């Protein structure tokens, strides 16, 4: 029976990076939709709160289902494409809620939020597992870092792009519909670009080692052995969810959760802090300041991915957490929105948005390769996304209802991020990586 060759590493990275760009772009655009619903559509605060809560909880919880399913049936590329398409359909729902009024609009908002949560739950566990399987241990962090940079680019670009398109004379609801079309188009490209698992060719290993080795240079043979398993039914049933909860996975999920509570608790409130406490106003300057913070991950993720390939990942993770805490403390030591404040937020963003390659590189060391997607769903879905859902609420509680206390809340959350370093020794030391080329 003829079989198609497994996609080359460069193709895996390119197509999965497109998926990451689209996924994170839409995910970080959804709060903008909440703002539109609140200001232009007079949607109640209760509905907006419910919208965001449903989105984040659905995304965190459904990720486990997606991970377990992918580890049992494969088809990660197709499932990622379905996730991006579902995000596109959710934007159509948000568009309808913006043009309708009354209870029907509110119902559509909540339904679209649930769809968006389901759609967004797919990429991180599945895209991460594709790269974990498709690259050798010595190149995995760099691949995840480059891929993560595209996600950071999407989250930094999408909100600004929305207002650019709207400025061309297209209505804001119609601009949302344009983004929906882009998501559906990207989903089709992803479905074509990832037609097979990166692990499809284990049964053909002897016949393809030389070909695939040319894609990875000196890392070729280890990469093939590391990433190839049958596409059809696996030879062994993936371990149960309970069996994956070893000490390192539980500790890493806990660290990811509290990091995310602290980081997103700060990130979500930075715009309000700038407008109410530093009198930035709703201006271009505010947009630039927030963009500088988000853009830090574009640089930080590839850098920390390379560090993860070369040094003890636990130490690199600890440095990342401490760097984020230092960044927010430096920001609090500045005043206004001048150059010093921008530089401090850039440092904060550089470390804060660089966790993706670190966390998923560690997951690949702590779970069997047949359970990468489920392990990712635990650490990223329950840990990072779960913390993301709780972070803004924690900040609100710390302020006691007064924006004047946001600085104190940020300081407390920065300290929480730093304290997560104390849990690092609970993580099992991983085998040191040799310096291997990503593509040769």
Image (cartoon, rainbow, N blue to C red):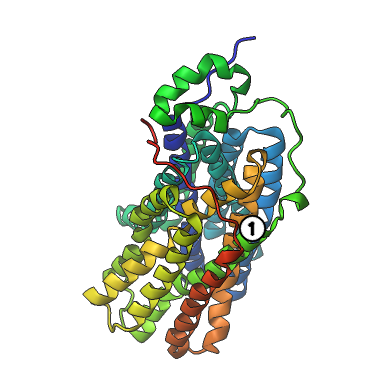
Residue located at (55% from left, 46% from top): 123
Neighbourhood count class around disc 1 (C-alpha, 10 Å): few under 14, some 14–19, many 20 upward: many
Query: Between residues 414 and 287, which one lies in front from this camera angle?
Result: 414
On-image quarter of the C terminus: top left
Residue 125 appears in the figure: yes
Q: Which residue is mark 1?
A: 248
Which residue is at a point 55% across and 48% down the rendered structure image?
124
Q: Is residue 418 rendered to the left or right of residue 168?
A: right
> 268 or 358, which is in the foreground?
358
Q: In the rendered image of this protein, does residue 260 appear above or below residue 19? A: below
**Does 66 sit left or right of 224 as displayed?**
right
Q: Is residue 71 above or below residue 53?
A: above
Q: What is the quadrant of the N terminus in the image?
A: top right
Percent x, y of residue 406: 45, 84
Image coordinates of residue 280 in percent, x first then y, are 30, 79
Placement of 421 over or under 189, stated as above or below: below
Coordinates of residue 64 in the picture (x, y in percent) = 69, 51
Kindly state the secondary structure of the residue where label 1 is placed. Answer: helix
- Give x and y (percent) for residue 276: 38, 84
In the image, 416: left or right of 344? right
Residue 104 visible here: no
Q: Count all numbered tags in the image, as a single digit.
A: 1
Instruction: Residue 434: name its quadrant.
Output: top left
User: Left or right: 140 with respect to 165?
Assistant: right
Residue name at image x 39 percent, y 45 percent: 146
Q: Residue at x 65, y 26 (%)?
A: 231
Q: State whether residue 150 is above or below residue 417.
A: above
Name the residue furthest top: 1
């Amino acid at each position: 029976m003829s079989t198609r060759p497994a996609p080359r590493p460069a193709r895996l990275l390119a197509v999965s990076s497109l998926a990451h760009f689209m996924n994170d772009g839409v995910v970080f655009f959804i709060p903008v939709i909440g703002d539109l619903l609140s200001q232009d559509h007079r949607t109640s605060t209760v509905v907006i709160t419910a919208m965001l809560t449903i989105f984040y909880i659905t995304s965190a919880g459904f990720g486990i289902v997606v991970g377990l399913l992918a580890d049992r049936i494969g088809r990660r590329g197709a499932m990622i494409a379905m996730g991006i398409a579902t995000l596109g359909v959710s934007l159509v729902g948000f568009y309808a809620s913006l043009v309708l009024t009354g209870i029907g609009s509110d119902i559509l908002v909540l339904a679209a939020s649930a769809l968006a949560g389901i759609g967004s739950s797919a990429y991180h566990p599945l895209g991460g597992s594709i790269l974990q399987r498709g690259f050798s241990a010595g190149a995995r962090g760099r691949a995840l870092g480059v891929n993560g940079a595209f996600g950071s680019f999407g989250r930094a670009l999408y909100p600004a792009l929305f207002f650019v398109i709207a400025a061309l004379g297209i209505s804001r609801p119609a601009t949302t519909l344009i983004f929906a079309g882009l998501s559906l188009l990207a989903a089709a490209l992803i479905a074509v670009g990832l037609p097979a698992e990166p692990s499809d060719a284990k049964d053909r290993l002897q016949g393809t080692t030389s070909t695939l080795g040319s894609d990875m240079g000196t890392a070729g043979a280890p990469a093939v052995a590391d990433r190839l398993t049958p596409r059809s039914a696996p030879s062994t049933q993936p371990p149960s969810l309970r069996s994956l909860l070893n000490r390192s996975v539980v500790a890493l999920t806990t660290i990811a959760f509290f990091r995310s509570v602290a980081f997103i608790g700060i990130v979500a409130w930075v715009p309000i802090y700038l407008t109410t406490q530093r009198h930035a106003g709703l201006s271009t300057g505010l947009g630039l300041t927030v963009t500088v913070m988000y853009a830090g991950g574009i640089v930080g993720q590839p850098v920390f991915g390379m560090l993860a390939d070369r040094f003890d990942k636990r130490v690199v993770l600890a440095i990342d957490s401490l760097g984020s805490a230092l960044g927010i403390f430096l920001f609090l030591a500045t005043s206004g929105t001048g150059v010093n404040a921008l530089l401090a937020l850039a440092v904060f963003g550089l470390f804060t948005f660089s966790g993706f390659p670190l966390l998923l590189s560690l997951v690949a060391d702590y779970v069997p390769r047949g359970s990468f997607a489920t392990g990712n769903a635990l650490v990223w879905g329950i840990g990072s996304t779960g913390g993301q859902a709780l972070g803004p609420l924690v900040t609100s509680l710390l302020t006691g209802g007064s924006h004047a206390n946001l600085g104190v809340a940020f300081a407390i959350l920065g300290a929480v991020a730093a304290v997560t370093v104390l849990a690092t020794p609970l993580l099992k030391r991983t085998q040191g990586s040799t310096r291997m080329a990503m593509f040769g």
